[in-house]
Amino acid sequence: MRGHWLGHAGPDRTRHPFEPGRLVAGLVILGVAAAYGMDAAGEWDVRPEIALPALLCGLCVAALTSALTYAFRRRSGRATPDD
């Protein structure tokens, strides 16, 4: 049972490439959701004038991260070794 752990197949890591833009977007959305959750619990006073622009800026950073990742992968895919 080579490549198996306790009789179960390991996760197939070749199916989906890592996408840092989605990671950044998810973290931004989780952060804003946590801030609103703390506001609902009465721990923080979150004003929409601050939270919504922060969400927009975070999603713009996620889009920039995705664009840079795409450009890097495209450029590195075209590079061929000179033999």
Image (cartoon, helix red, strand yellow):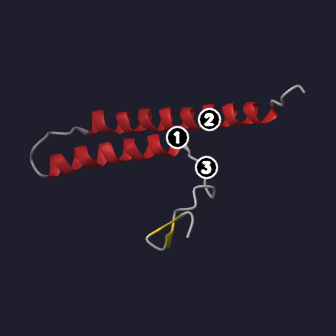
Q: Outermost residue, left direction?
A: 42
The relative height of residue 53 versus residue 1 in the rendered view (above or below) is above
For the residues labelled 2 and 1, the Cα–Cα distance comes to 7 Å
Task: Give residue 22's position: percent from left, percent from top.
Answer: 50, 46
Q: Outermost residue, right direction?
A: 83
- Closest to the observer, 67 or 54: 67
Q: Residues within 10 Å of mark 1 (few under 14, many from 20)?
A: some
Question: Secondary structure under badge 3?
Answer: loop
Q: Quadrant of residue 43?
A: top left
For the residues labelled 2 and 3, the Cα–Cα distance comes to 11 Å
Q: Residue at x 21, y 51 (%)?
A: 37
What amino acid type should be assigned to the residue bearing mark 1?
Pro
Tell which tag, 1 or 3, sits nearer the viewer: 3
- Closest to the observer, 79 or 5: 5
Tell which tag, 2 or 3, sits nearer the viewer: 3
User: What label does residue 20 carry, if any?
Assistant: 1
Q: Earlier in the sequence, mark 2 or mark 1?
A: 1
Q: Residue at x 58, y 38 (%)?
A: 66
Question: Secondary structure under badge 2?
Answer: helix
- Closest to the observer, 21 or 49: 21
User: What label does residue 17 carry, if any?
Assistant: 3
- Reading the image, the residue beneath label 2 is 69
What amino acid type should be assigned to the residue bearing mark 3?
Pro
Task: Give residue 23's position: percent from left, percent from top.
Answer: 46, 44
Task: Give residue 56's position: percent from left, percent from top.
Answer: 43, 37
The relative height of residue 56 versus residue 39 in the rendered view (above or below) is above
Q: Is residue 60 left or right of residue 54?
A: right
Q: Outermost residue, bottom direction?
A: 7
Q: Residue at x 30, y 38 (%)?
A: 51
